């Protein structure tokens, strides 16, 4: 799409057409980041209400014309090509305001950018505002911001938004430096305390409101685990604070945000989609970070809540009228997709009798196994979404066959590309060490996990002797610390450890297997230093669905997989490891422990109707 037209007989439109040196693909992530763009343009921050007016979200400004209200028309866009948004004001100097940007390949190389703004004045104040050149100044500021982005992408500028306002922290610099020094003393600093402190001091507000550990990992050249650990260590030192964002499974918008896992609601309601859902730590709860108010207090609200980069998994979001078909030039890749169709203005004066509901369809697209490689035509009826015949190569066709205006959303199902889920966060050893007592108030789904349970036969005699003396020293000096370090290196955490029993949790079964091999190595090292070495540990390793639960010690895990690990453990012998065979493969275990002997066995366990198939390693 080469342009987005904005026209009105009563409105005033200003437009710009200019060229940039870099490609549309490299410029889009920044030119489509409407929150950061609006901050650079010094547009007001605002908040969204939870209710709707005529089917549209209601917003109110937190700066500028403070208290000004408007209805927010959801953005429309095609990723990499164009975006458009509109506001219908309920108060203030304007009736409507809209802006649109189109990005295309320039014939001379680089990119062509077309930008337009439109405003409809409300009364004398509105006419005065527009006649003063307000729209022209906005467009000129966007042009300058686009050139800054182009210079950043080409390597000529160190920052993409140098004109964005930056919060001053000089009055708390001593506090900032002191907390960074405190963070450096922790084992989870990972050498980035000074860089984090500098970022908190210098970055624009929009860069700091939602710090994502995965993006931080790329910026600081860390692994994802190291970045998450650094954020948790910064929270412990008072540089950052953590929060858990509960997202609507349909639109992925934030429905609730809490500072502690214990405050997370068990269920929630999305006012935008009129949808009730349960909290799932692995699916719709994201861990976010932001500066602690003592070192930098961020203003409330945002400059934009729903632009393309707020939902980067969405390829296109567009309104289609009844009977309308729209073709998009887009070379879509193989993958897992979802189409959503949402009625527009349902229940409003313009569409009072609509009975349409939100529809959705999940499907996989794989050209390698298709007779025709074209993406299927998406057909929306009044009651379902259908996949029609393949569209011509390099295009996506959307068709609204219903009697209602519909908003069609085509998105990748891999929406969590940059999101660190709560399940991924709470399973880390760093979380257990620094925030382990923060647990949900009730059992909460946390996806699939692998559990390693171990029983230290050799420690029993040491514990018995210690009890006879009236003292309970560590039966194996340094053992708990070494096990925790090992769990950390395998991207997991020790859930329980005391006396002769332990339990560790991991999201990835391969990590659990590596941890098990590491325990075996530690055991062999200890045996080599003993006068009469004996096999001491027995281990059971299982996997399946898990729940995060509160306990007297803080965060714990329950579910059939955790219970099965403890049940299987009771059937093990010294030096034996039992792996649940439908979770672990013998080839994986052979690579990790090439000298082990592997047998497949079936055990009848108490409380289970069917025998459990296991891989036994000796």
Image: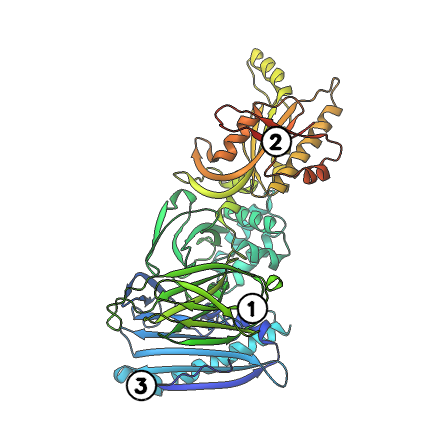
**Mark pair 1, 3: CA separation:** 46 Å
Q: Which mark is residue 614?
A: 2
View extreme (top): residue: 468
- Can you identify the residue that label 3 sits on? 128
Task: Tell me whether the residue at label 1 lies in contact with that at label 3, contact meaning CB atoms closer than 8 angstroms.
Answer: no
Q: Position of residue 24 (x, y in %)?
A: 58, 75
Q: Nearer the viewer, residue 515 or 304?
A: 515
Q: Position of residue 88 (x, y in %)?
A: 31, 74
**Residue under the point 47% across and 35% down:** 559
Q: Earlier in the sequence, mark 2 or mark 3?
A: 3
Q: Is label 2 or label 3 in front?
A: 2
Q: Earlier in the sequence, mark 2 or mark 1?
A: 1
User: Callout 3: few (<14), some (14-19), or many (20+) C-alpha neighbours within 10 Å?
Assistant: some
Tag count: 3
Q: Nearer the viewer, residue 492 or 239?
A: 492
Question: Please, which colouring scheme is shown?
Answer: rainbow
- Can you identify the residue that label 1 sits on? 332
- The answer to whether one can see residue 348 in this image is yes
Q: Earlier in the sequence, mark 1 or mark 3?
A: 3
Element carrying mark 2: strand
- The answer to whether residue 377 is above or below residue 107 is above
């Amino acid at each position: 799409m080469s342009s987005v037209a904005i026209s009105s007989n009563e409105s005033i439109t200003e437009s710009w057409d200019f060229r940039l040196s870099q490609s549309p693909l490299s410029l889009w992530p920044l030119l489509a980041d409407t929150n950061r763009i609006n901050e650079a343009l010094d547009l007001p921050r605002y908040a969204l209400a939870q209710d709707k007016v005529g089917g549209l979200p209601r917003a109110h400004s937190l700066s500028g014309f403070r208290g000004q209200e408007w209805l927010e028309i959801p953005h429309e866009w095609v990723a990499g090509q164009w975006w458009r948004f509109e506001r219908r004001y309920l108060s203030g100097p304007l009736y409507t305001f809209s802006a649109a940007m189109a990005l295309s390949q320039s014939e001379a190389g680089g990119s062509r950018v077309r930008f337009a703004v439109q405003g409809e004045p409300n009364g004398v104040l509105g006419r005065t505002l527009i006649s003063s050149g307000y729209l022209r100044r906005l467009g000129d500021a966007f042009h300058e911001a686009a050139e800054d982005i182009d210079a950043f992408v080409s390597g000529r500028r160190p920052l993409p938004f140098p004109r964005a306002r930056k919060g001053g922290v000089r009055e708390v610099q001593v506090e900032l430096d002191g907390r960074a020094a405190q963070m450096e003393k922790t084992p989870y600093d990972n050498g980035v305390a000074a860089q984090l402190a500098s970022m908190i001091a210098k970055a624009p507000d929009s860069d700091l409101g939602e710090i994502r550990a995965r993006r931080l990992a790329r910026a600081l050249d860390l692994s994802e685990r190291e970045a998450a650990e650094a954020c948790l260590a910064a929270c412990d030192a008072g540089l950052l604070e953590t929060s858990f964002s509960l997202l609507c499974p349909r639109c992925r918008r934030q429905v609730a945000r809490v500072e502690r896992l214990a405050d997370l609601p068990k269920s929630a309601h999305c006012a935008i989609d009129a949808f009730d859902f349960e909290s799932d730590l692995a699916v719709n709860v994201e861990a976010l970070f932001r500066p602690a108010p003592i070192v930098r207090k961020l203003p409330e609200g945002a400059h934009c809540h729903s632009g393309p980069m707020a939902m980067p998994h969405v390829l296109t979001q567009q309104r289609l009228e009844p009977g309308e078909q729209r073709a998009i030039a887009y070379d879509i890749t193989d993958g897992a997709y979802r189409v959503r169709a949402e009625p527009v203005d349902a229940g409003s004066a313009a569409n009072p009798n609509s009975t349409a509901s939100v529809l959705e369809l999940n499907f996989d697209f794989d050209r390698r196994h298709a007779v025709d490689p074209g993406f299927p035509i998406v057909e929306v009826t009044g009651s379902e979404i259908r996949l029609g015949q393949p569209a011509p190569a390099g295009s996506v066709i959307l068709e609204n066959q219903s009697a209602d205006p519909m908003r069609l959303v085509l998105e990748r199902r891999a929406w969590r590309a940059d999101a660190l889920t709560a399940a991924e966060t709470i399973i880390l050893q760093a979380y257990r060490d620094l925030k382990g007592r923060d647990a949900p108030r009730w059992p909460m789904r946390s996806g699939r996990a692998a559990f390693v349970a171990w029983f230290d036969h050799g420690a029993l005699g040491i514990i018995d002797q210690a009890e006879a003396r009236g003292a309970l020293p560590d039966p194996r000096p340094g053992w708990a610390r070494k096990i925790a370090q090992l769990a950390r290196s395998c991207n997991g955490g020790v859930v329980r450890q005391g006396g002769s029993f332990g339990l560790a949790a991991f999201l990835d079964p391969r990590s659990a297997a590596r941890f098990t091999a590491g325990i075996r190595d530690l055991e062999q090292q200890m045996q080599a230093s003993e006068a009469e070495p004996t096999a001491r540990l027995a281990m059971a390793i299982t996997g399946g669905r898990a729940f995060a639960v509160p306990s007297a010690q803080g965060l714990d895990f329950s579910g059939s997989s955790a219970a099965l690990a403890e049940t299987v453990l009771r059937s093990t012998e010294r030096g034996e490891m039992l792996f649940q065979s439908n979770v672990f493969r013998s080839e994986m275990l052979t690579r990790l422990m090439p000298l082990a002997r592997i047998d497949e066995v079936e055990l009848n366990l108490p409380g289970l109707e069917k025998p459990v198939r296991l891989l036994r390693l000796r």
